[in-house]
Image (spheres, rainbow, N blue to C red):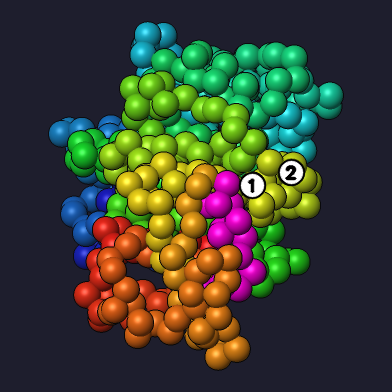
Amino acid sequence: MRFVLPASRERTICLAEGASCAKLRPKAELRGCRRGCAASRLWVRRVAVVDGPRWCASAGSAGPRAMLSRVHEGPPPPVDRRPRRASRSSMSRARPLVSVLLPVRDEALTLEACLASVRRQTIDDWECVLVDDGSEDATAELARQAARADPRIRVQTIAATGLVGALNIGLDAARGRFIARMDGDDVMHRARLASQLAVLEVEPTLAAVGCHVRLFPRSGLREGRRAYERWLNAIDSPARVRAEAFVECPIAHPSLMVRGEVLRACRYRDRGWPEDYDLVLRLLGAGHEIGVVPRRLLLWRDRPTRLSRTSPVYGLDRFTACKAAFLAADFLADEAGYVLCGYGATGKALFRALVSHGKRPSHIVELHPGRLGKIIHGARVVPPRALAEIPRQPIVVSVAHAEPRAEARATLRAMGFIEGRDFVCAA
């Protein structure tokens, strides 16, 4: 609703449809609006004055710019405070634009907040395919209640199958042109789906797009997790996704939106390592590009009971095994040997994992003076400057921490090596 003040004043007002705060207020007061309208900056506008009290209605979902042409005299009509429901046409549409793929198990404490964030999206053309994977708490009943309240939520109840099985069952049921992943203990920003759709629709070369995240709750969040969040949120382009792909999974899986035909062709698979990392590396290996919306559009819950904390599938050794398998099949595919930069705990683990794929380093580049000149498992240990004298081979930089990894990148670039072609960084 847009109100125009008499006299010659100008004020900032709340334009949120049906919001309890839809009244004339100074901008300073509006910042405290319980609906968060000023914070979102989507429904706030400065309006100038005309003669007499007049009002005009904005056209619902089209936003404040699309106003009806007639200006009516007198007081505004009463605000309809009933919850908005999706139109019947959008509910019954055979193929929604977006399918939110949501596998859950025992998420009764967090599911309602998760689904509320889906329903608050700024686009209406979505469905949520919720797969209850053998929950033993009230998750299934909460899901059914949500589906009765909003037919766009479709519930699949299955016996406990595991995450990969639940994902593929949900994928088979999903009808959307785009598939957006979500977890039952996370919360998405109301603009997430619209923001990611906008990128995919204007960038046909992208197969998928992620977004930045904010881990929560912040209390008790260890420095290691905060550092991981900073690293993840520094990735802001397809080029950075590729460059960081063997350091760690460069996209938070619950933030990923994929073109439907791409994900249906790839599907999820169980290889004994993280299924999300496996998917991202397969997409990149197939030549697909993955973009990033550089906004924090996902609240990513961090808790001790999260599957990534409790299942051995997500252990550090399984991440290393995943990296080694993809490095051997792609970057190192045409070479039996390579140069390994770094032989700390991270480098040793990757060395062992690559040996299982028949890949052994001819040289190990190290700074540790006690190792220089030695032979380790048949590989001579040399300083970085020796790279100029070694016959060109693929280089794998295996350094755990960001600062020394950045130094290694800078050194290799200064020597004329090109990242992605001549060397990759892993951790």
**Residue 72 drawn above or below residue 42:** above
Q: Are marks 1 and 2 in contact (CB under 8 Å)?
A: yes
Q: Position of residue 186 (x, y in %)?
A: 61, 44
Circle 2 sits on which residue?
312
Q: Badge 2 local density, few (<14 within 10 Å), some, or many (20+)?
A: some
Measured in 3D between alpha carbons, the distance from the residue under mark 1 to the one under mark 2, in whole angstroms, is: 8 Å
- The residue type indicated by label 2 comes to Pro
Residue at coordinates 30% horizontally, 52% vertically from top-left? 238
Q: Which residues are magenta?
A: 342-356
- Position of residue 51 in the picture relative to residue 284 (left or right): left
Q: Position of residue 274 (x, y in %)?
A: 60, 41
**Residue 328 drawn above or below residue 374:** above
Q: Badge 1 local density, few (<14 within 10 Å), some, or many (20+)?
A: some
Report if residue 6 is visible in the image: no
User: Would residue 345 be counted in the magenta stretch?
Assistant: yes
Secondary structure beneath dot 2 equals helix
